[in-house]
Image: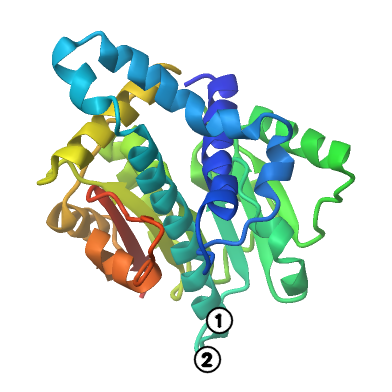
Amino acid sequence: MRPSQRSRTAEGTAALRAAHLLLDDEPVVLDDGYAADLLGAGWAQAAVEPWARARRRLAKSAAAAAPWAGRFPTGTRRLRAQVVVRSRYAEDRLGEAMERDEAPVAQYVILAAGLDTYALRSRHLEERLKVFELDHPETQSAKRQRLTVLGIDWPPHAELVPIDFERQTLREALADSHHDASRPTFFSWLGCTYYLTRKAILDTLRVVAAQPAGSQIAFDFWSRSLPRRADRLLLRSLRLSVAGVGEQMLSFFDRREATELIRQAGLEVDEILDTREAQRRYLAGRRDGLVMPDFSYLALAAVR
């Protein structure tokens, strides 16, 4: 994927976070008041354009066009639920890691940060937490430019760490930053694993496994074992959408396969949440139709 395409992917994710505040009922799952500002005028289009492309592609198939025609609003809502829940999950687990008595975490690494806004929303923690955002230099430059236009200063407790994923390893990028390799670190890695090979995923997890005891990583992964037709269609549309910007979805895991991968990397599984478990934790009792897609899983792994 080219750098400019990375920016479009980041914008689409941020647009879904912004749409959550506009379209969904209380209580808010993720209160990201910066997302719409970072996107600027026309941000709502960024939330629906990938679906429009996928719809046009699906319409070429007579068999798929009719049953899919009415499913875009529901599909968008399910994807929005997945995006806000995965961010909320990672930030909740980070908060717990910071408050624990033994080896509390004071470093947070956000892999492929895109337009993530945690650094902006956590200024009150600047005395307790150092945030490292890793992403392609072009994506980071666009983010800084937007903040400058908005008159928002970059928070002093956060560092933008450029990484060219095609030429650098995670280990090299961290070594070039102010990250302290002798202290426990919490990592989040959201919206990434399905675009990577199994080897690339394993390599990243092994870098985390080499961190001091008490380090953790929260990440999401997707499964292709889907009993509901609506979720199969949703996943198909997503694959068509990202294909439109030159990307492919490469890796899918069930719970057992993800557990094996985590252990092979040298980490221990703290928990893996499937859709129903995540739904109970974050979306129980809602009446706005905010429901997780069945293919979404959340994982927390640790260095012991």
Q: Residues within 10 Å of mark 1 (few under 14, many from 20)?
A: some
In this picture, residue 233 sits left or right of residue 160: left
On the image, the x and y values in percent for residue 243 come to 36, 19
Question: Which residue bears the numbered disc 2?
Answer: 101
Of residues 135 and 168, the one drawn nearer to the viewer in this rendering: 135
Is any part of residue 164 visible from this angle?
no
On the image, the x and y values in percent for residue 10 come to 56, 36
In this picture, residue 120 sits left or right of residue 27: right
Quarter of image, res 268: bottom left
In this picture, residue 211 sits left or right of residue 249: right
Q: Residue at x 22, y 53 (%)?
A: 261
Dots 2, 1 in contact, CB < 8 A:
yes
On the image, the x and y values in percent for residue 93 come to 46, 72
Work out which residue is located at the far right of the displayed protein and give it: 151
On the image, the x and y values in percent for residue 189 come to 45, 51
Question: Which residue bears the numbered disc 1?
Answer: 104
Label 2: element kind: loop
Quarter of image, res 303: bottom left
Q: Residue at x 27, y 13 (%)?
A: 59
Q: Residues within 10 Å of mark 2 (few under 14, many from 20)?
A: few
Label 1: element kind: loop
Q: Which mark is residue 195?
A: none
Disc 1 marks which amino acid?
Answer: Pro
Q: Residue at x 58, y 28 (%)?
A: 45
In this picture, residue 154 sits left or right of residue 279: right
Work out which residue is located at the far top of the displayed protein and give it: 60
Of residues 194 and 276, the one drawn nearer to the viewer in this rendering: 276
What separation in Å lies between label 2 and label 1 (alpha carbons)?
6 Å
Q: Residue at x 73, y 57 (%)?
A: 120
